[in-house]
Amino acid sequence: MKNALLSGLVIGIFSGLWLFIMYKMGYGLEDSKVSPFEYISVLIPIIGLLIGIKDYRDNYLGGNMGFLEALVQSFKILLFGGIIAVFAGIAYINWVAEANNFQDFSGRMFGALLVGLLSALGVSLLYTTKSNKVD
């Protein structure tokens, strides 16, 4: 649980910071268009999951991990990171970009959810070391 909390905290903080960095660079949520620069944010949960799951496998499980263990740990990491990122998004909407952009923001959060789920599946497959045959 400690690993999931720490990795989720890192993902959440970087995702929140990325939102404010995008605003400072002139990109906002005022329009429904996604800038090409915004697609770089996909790397935050992927890199965070890669580091978090590898650390969990090597330091907590002795280098031997099944797919379901990796998937559950990935979901824990993404849950903690998502909570922090949503709070950062709410702060962004309420205090920085005080426009009627809740619909655009919720669409981006749904996209982030899909990216997180696909990342969790991919990282879990990548770091699985135990093979469970069904006979």
Image (cartoon, rainbow, N blue to C red):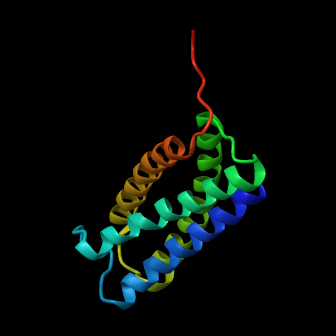
Residue drawn at (45%, 85%) of the image: 96
Residue drawn at (56%, 46%) of the image: 127
Q: Quadrant of the C terminus?
A: top right
Name which quarter of the figure residue 93 lies in. bottom left
- Left or right: residue 103 versus residue 81 is left
Does any portion of residue 43 appear in the rendered image?
yes
- The location of residue 30, given as percent across then percent down, is 29, 76
Does any portion of residue 35 appear in the rendered image?
no
- Left or right: residue 50 versus residue 20 is right
64 or 27: nearer the viewer? 64
Instruction: Using the image, determine if residue 21 lies above or below residue 112.
Output: below
Instruction: Using the image, determine if residue 81 lies above or below residue 91.
Output: above
- The location of residue 105, given as percent across then percent down, is 38, 65
24 or 120: nearer the viewer? 120
Instruction: Using the image, determine if residue 8 lies above or below residue 135.
Output: below
Residue drawn at (75%, 46%) of the image: 61
Name which quarter of the figure residue 82 lies in. bottom right
Residue drawn at (47%, 52%) of the image: 116
- Left or right: residue 38 versus residue 116 is left
